[in-house]
Image: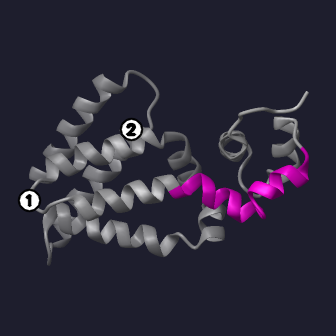
Amino acid sequence: MPRTRVDTSAEIRAVATELFARQGFEKTSLREVAEQLGITKAALYYHFPSKVDLVRGIVQPLLDDVEALLAEAGEGDPQGFLADYFDVVLRHRQVFELVIRDVGALAQLDLMEQMLGWRERTYRLLVGEGATPAQIAKATVAIGGLQDCALTEGSVEDFREAALGAAIAALRS
């Protein structure tokens, strides 16, 4: 039966994200993705010419949202920034887990430099230019802990408030 009015690209990204998260980037073949969807490899290649293009298609919305957050964030409002960051991580939970757990995907996309740049920009937003090692450590604990809480299974609203409170406390300690 022909597929009608279906966003095949979105379906491919969803299935591939699930497979990459479960099996890893290197161990997942495009053939498996196509088989899960019941489409041919040729159809998959029509939408994503390579595995790297597919991973880029999966990760790009996360990249775009983090870039937008960093561009829009104003210094002097760490609580607002942390709340927005939590929401970005939560919105892209599965993709974020994939990126964190599978460094091979990061290497394929040359994302390490971009993510390190995010870290530096985040430090400036949270603790300012010329931060001391102690301030940077506090910012690292705040953002890393908040990120981990956003990825935790369970009641998001309960976790969100507790995580934000803990992140702000880490910055102020």
Q: Nearer the viewer, residue 7 or 25?
A: 7
Q: Name the amino acid, label 1.
A: Gly
Q: Please state if 109 lies on the left or on the right of 170 as rendered.
A: right
Q: Name the amino acid, label 2.
A: Ala
Q: Please state if 69 lies on the left or on the right of 46 as rendered.
A: left
The extreme front residue here reads 5
Residue depicted at x 38% and y 57%: 66
Q: Nearer the viewer, residue 157 or 49?
A: 49
Q: Nearer the viewer, residue 12 or 88?
A: 12
Question: Picture coordinates of residue 41 (x, y %)?
Answer: 89, 51
Q: Quadrant of residue 67?
A: bottom left
Above-or-below relation of 82 to 108: above
Question: Picture coordinates of residue 3 (x, y %)?
Answer: 82, 33
Q: CA distance from mark 1 to mark 2?
A: 23 Å
Say whether residue 50 is magenta.
yes
Residue depicted at x 74% and y 45%: 23
Query: In this figure, what is the number of numbered marks?
Result: 2
What are the residue bounds of the magenta stretch? Answer: 40-60
Main SS type for the magenta part? helix
Q: Of circles 1 and 2, which is in front? A: 1
Above-or-below relation of 36 to 97: above
Say whether residue 132 is magenta.
no
Residue bearing the label numbered 1: 76
Q: Secondary structure at mark 1?
A: loop
Residue bearing the label numbered 2: 150
Residue depicted at x 53% and y 54%: 100
Above-or-below relation of 19 to 70: above
Residue depicted at x 89% and y 54%: 42
Q: Quadrant of residue 83?
A: top left
**Whether residue 161 can be seen here:** yes
Question: Picture coordinates of residue 34 (x, y %)?
Answer: 85, 44
